[in-house]
Image (cartoon, coloured by chain):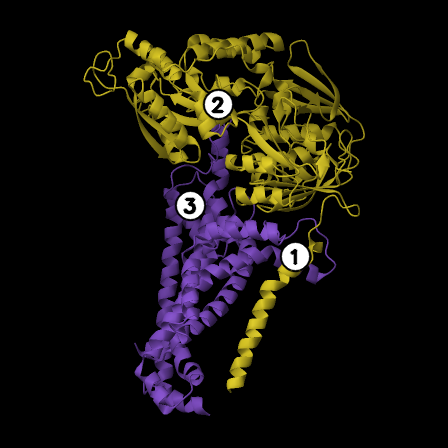
Chain colours: A purple, B yellow
């Protein structure tokens, strides 16, 4: 088949297959090593960062009714009466055993709180990311392909507006429109107290609640992906080998599919992967507008209440997801672009 | 090959269309309406918060207490006019010396799990609160408790260390817990760490399901001995932002909302089938302008910085500032009219204890200027700002506020303008609430602050923060010291005759008003809204307003 031939011709590395394997392993080991070090650094930083904040979690409110004994009793319960280094050692020891501690204000293990809210966040950004990638890439390719046409300009302007619009504002607009025009629910994940005919009724209800936040997410991120994809494809189109392909007499659809797309994916993959890491927290605004019970909401609440254990756990989770997303981008990149492996 | 590629594109497109369109085109069947003839009658309340815990011992947020009120009973209950009625007790007797209170418990009350509730549970609960210093609020209410005993199934004997006038208000939040459940969690840290997810009580509503920061789902307890609800289910749903909360009411997704941004009020008032109500909150909310008037000899040895402007020690200066404060303008501009002008820290919502005979200082710039002229604060260098009588420093005051009060910048702006007209300059600054606490008390490292308080029904708390002995503890924000006032405070704290105590409380308000300890720009109104096409029977004309209180929610009925 044709693609095989092309693969060989594009093997710029020129290495023998087994050599490529070794360099690939080194590359992966090095990347994992850095990722591990970064996580360790975050673990330490996380502990001290929140304790620099002014105030005292035991004094949750300015209230004359809180007696000094009460405040001290609460500090003892939270373990805040111990010297800082003891608190730190306990934190590291527990973390090594997989125990992220208990929330100060929710009387639940941090792991439970994070798992619940992370599940909801992943559902929302999972759907949003999927739709935004599909739409973004399709529109980006379309715009580049029909470059300088009415289609191109419309897509370009639309994407710029979507990307530049403040998430919060855009969400509110969709919230008003969706609730009054489409009768969609605007708060939470489920209709509380509803009884469903079956599992599909349950998921249909979740879908109705997810629709507006997912739409907000999709539009905002699709705008960004469209712009990246469009410029990447345009850049590839100006390469000499595309000219060669054209000279060979290939049809434009063939050129796009067999020569341009894979290379044009590179920058977009980077952006998508980086976004994936950040959007675990980046959905904060969308979750706040639509009262979606995700990680962003959990973080906002924990900051309000100086809930150190939840903040530590949440930021560790965020750091790990950003690092993992970066790692994923690196590995995907090396798969998509062999030059990276030997760099 | 080409056709394959295109086919995928078409499939993808169809898939996207389906995925986006499907939910929007679903019929409205999945959205239950509360006034349905079939199925339970469900009332939905939208609010911006959520309980912090279901464990009454460690609850801090107001939303938590709202839910406790639904699920638990107490010995006394607070009514909208500030009076108390009996809860689980049928009667009580007080001994001659006022130290021993004997309650007769209503027979036949059962917990939600079917177990009987007796005097033993009452005594157990009160003893639990007394034993746990790590219960921040409920432990506080037991400070005067010597012992609590249940000699038999229907009698509770509460002995106090000294006779206090406001025992009823101390018992309002001491919820009756089931001993058969809590006795396993009573010792050490276990009590404060208990999640209490089953939340078994005796109250008019039972907990069905709870998701923190999402919803509280309650169902009626039709067997409640006093207030069986008329509705079947009650749902509190949390909204992450107030615009969504308002929109949820407009579109009928909730039947009532507990609060809203001031800007939404005009819109909601025009909305069909929605009624907006305002009134004094059950827990008064006071905005105060705090003068640092700490005398240097009272500077707290521990942590005191005491950098206040010396002019604020002079009552004449404070009085002039009071005359130069346009409270109505502040209310109209900063609060969009949703507040009442204030007098002292004791708020109008504390109805019985509020001294409304005091005549407020009129907004009168000329008079304010006259006062300052008369006592020698003159603008000697002609820069438009007055100097101290000895010429040592200008009347330039730091004016700070916590950045979690959205209207504070407008208040500061209005103050800056009108005070500028009497030759007083302000240096406005917003700060993090924690940073402000550090500057405030007991450091007294400030001149003037805009802040606020929320109180219970008893006047003890608002009067207590102005005592001299609260200066080192950090509860006093002003540094006010007046032995006469302190003596009256001690006197009212043990005065058992309600009328006589009221006289003292009135006198104390007069003293601090005359001394201009604070300027109270306003008492904040509670503003709530409900749908008129769903439920009737909302209590909206009582002296105080709280639609989400158990008194209201047990009596509302669906619209026929």
Question: Circle 2 — which element?
Answer: strand
Between marks 3 and 2 in the image, the one whose residue lies nearer the viewer: 2
Whole-percent x and y of residue B396? 27, 22
What residue is pinned by disc 2?
B522
Question: Circle 1 — which element?
Answer: helix
Q: Is residue A138 above or below residue A301?
A: below
Q: Quadrant of residue B207?
A: top right
Q: Have a look at marks 1 and 3 and say if they share a chain.
A: yes
Which chain hosts label 2? B
Q: Quadrant of residue B299?
A: top left
Q: Have a look at marks 1 and 2 and say if they share a chain.
A: no
Between marks 1 and 3 in the image, the one whose residue lies nearer the viewer: 1
Q: Is residue B443 visible?
A: no
Q: What residue is rendered at 43% in x and 38% in y?
A: A81
> Is B103 positioned to the left or the right of A220 in the image?
right
The answer to whether marks 3 and 2 mark residues whose Cβ atoms lie closer than 8 Å is no
Using a 10 Å C-alpha cutoff, classify the residue at mark 2 as few (fewer than 14 neighbours), some (14 to 19) or many (20 or more): many
- Distance, label 1 to label 3, CA atoms, is 44 Å
């Amino acid at each position: 088949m044709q693609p095989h031939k092309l693969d060989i011709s594009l093997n710029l590395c020129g290495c023998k297959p087994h050599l490529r394997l070794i360099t690939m392993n080194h590359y992966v080991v090095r990347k994992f090593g850095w990722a591990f070090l970064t996580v360790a650094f975050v673990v330490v930083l996380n502990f001290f960062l929140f304790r620099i904040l002014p105030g005292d979690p035991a004094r949750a409110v300015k209230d004359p009714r809180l007696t000094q004994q009460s405040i001290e009793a609460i500090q003892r319960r939270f373990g805040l009466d111990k010297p800082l280094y003891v608190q730190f050692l306990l934190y590291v020891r527990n973390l090594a055993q997989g125990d992220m501690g208990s929330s100060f204000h929710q009387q639940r293990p941090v792991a439970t709180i994070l798992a619940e809210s992370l599940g909801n966040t992943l559902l929302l950004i999972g759907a949003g990311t999927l739709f935004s990638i599909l739409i973004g890439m399709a529109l980006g390719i379309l715009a580049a392909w029909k470059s300088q046409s009415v289609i191109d300009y419309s897509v370009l302007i639309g994407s710029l507006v979507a990307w530049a619009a403040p998430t919060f504002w855009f969400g509110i607009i969709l919230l008003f429109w969706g609730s009054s025009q489409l009768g969609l629910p605007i708060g939470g994940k489920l209709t509380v107290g509803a009884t469903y005919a079956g599992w599909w009724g349950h998921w249909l209800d979740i879908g109705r609640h997810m629709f507006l936040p997912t739409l907000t997410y999709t539009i905002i991120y699709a705008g960004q992906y469209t712009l990246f994809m469009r410029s990447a494809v345009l850049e590839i189109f100006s390469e000499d080998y595309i000219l060669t392909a054209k000279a060979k007499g290939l049809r434009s659809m063939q050129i796009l599919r067999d020569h341009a797309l894979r290379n044009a994916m590179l920058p977009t993959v980077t952006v998508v992967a980086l976004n994936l890491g950040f959007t675990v927290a980046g959905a904060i605004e969308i979750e706040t507008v639509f009262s979606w019970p995700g990680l962003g909401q959990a973080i906002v609440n924990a900051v309000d209440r100086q809930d150190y254990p939840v903040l530590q756990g949440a930021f560790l989770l965020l750091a790990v997801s950003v690092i993992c997303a970066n790692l994923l981008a690196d590995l995907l990149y090396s798969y998509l672009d062999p030059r990276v492996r030997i760099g | 090959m080409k056709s394959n590629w295109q086919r995928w594109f078409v499939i993808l497109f169809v898939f996207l269309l389906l995925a986006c369109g499907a939910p929007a085109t679903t019929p409205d069947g999945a959205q239950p309406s509360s006034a349905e003839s079939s199925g339970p009658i469900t009332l939905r309340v939208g609010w911006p918060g959520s309980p912090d815990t279901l464990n009454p011992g460690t609850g801090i947020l107001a939303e938590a207490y709202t839910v406790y009120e639904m699920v638990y009973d107490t010995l006394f209950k607070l009514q909208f006019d500030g009076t108390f009625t009996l809860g689980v007790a049928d009667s009580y007797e007080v001994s001659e010396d006022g130290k021993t209170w004997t309650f007769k418990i209503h027979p036949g009350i059962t917990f939600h799990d079917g177990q009987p509730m007796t005097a033993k549970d009452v005594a157990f609960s009160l003893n639990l609160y007394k034993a746990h210093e790590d219960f921040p609020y409920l432990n506080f209410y037991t400070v005067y408790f010597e012992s609590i005993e249940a000699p038999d199934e229907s009698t509770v004997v509460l002995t106090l260390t000294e006779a206090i006038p406001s025992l009823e208000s101390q018992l309002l939040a001491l919820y009756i817990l089931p001993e058969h459940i809590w006795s396993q969690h009573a010792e050490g840290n276990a009590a404060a760490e208990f999640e209490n997810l089953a939340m078994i009580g005796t109250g008019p509503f039972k907990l069905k399901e709870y998701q923190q920061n999402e919803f509280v789902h309650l169902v009626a307890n039709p067997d409640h001995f006093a207030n069986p609800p008329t509705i079947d289910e009650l749902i509190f749903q949390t909204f992450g932002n107030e615009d969504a909360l308002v929109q949820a009411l407009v579109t009928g997704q909730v039947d009532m909302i507990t609060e809203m941004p001031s800007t939404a009020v005009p819109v909601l008032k025009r909305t069909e089938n929605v009624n907006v109500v305002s009134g004094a909150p059950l827990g008064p909310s006071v905005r105060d302008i705090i003068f640092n008037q700490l005398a240097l000899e009272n500077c707290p040895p521990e942590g005191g910085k005491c950098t206040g402007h010396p002019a604020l020690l002079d009552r004449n200066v404070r009085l002039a500032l009071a005359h130069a404060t346009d409270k109505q303008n502040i209310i109209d501009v900063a609060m969009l009219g949703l507040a009442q002008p204030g007098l002292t820290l004791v708020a109008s919502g504390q109805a019985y204890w509020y001294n409304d005979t005091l005549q407020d200082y009129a907004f009168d710039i000329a008079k304010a200027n006259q006062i300052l002229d008369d006592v020698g604060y003159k603008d000697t260098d002609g820069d438009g700002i007055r100097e101290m009588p000895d010429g040592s420093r200008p009347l330039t005051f730091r004016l700070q506020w916590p950045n979690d009060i959205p209207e504070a910048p407008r208040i500061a702006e209005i103050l800056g303008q009108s005070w500028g007209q009497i030759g007083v300059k302000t240096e406005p600054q917003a700060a993090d609430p924690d940073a402000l606490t550090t500057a405030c008390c007991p450091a007294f490292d400030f001149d003037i602050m805009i802040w606020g308080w929320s109180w219970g029904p008893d006047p003890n708390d608002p009067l207590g923060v102005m005592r001299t002995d609260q200066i080192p503890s950090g509860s006093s924000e002003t540094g006010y010291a007046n032995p006469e006032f302190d003596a009256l405070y001690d006197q009212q704290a043990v005065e058992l005759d309600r009328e006589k105590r009221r006289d003292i409380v009135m006198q104390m308000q007069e003293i601090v008003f005359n001394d201009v300890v604070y300027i109270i720009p306003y008492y904040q109104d509670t503003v709530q809204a409900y749908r008129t096409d769903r439920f009737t029977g909302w209590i909206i004309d009582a002296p105080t307003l709280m639609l989400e209180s158990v008194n209201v929610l047990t009596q509302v009925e669906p619209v026929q």
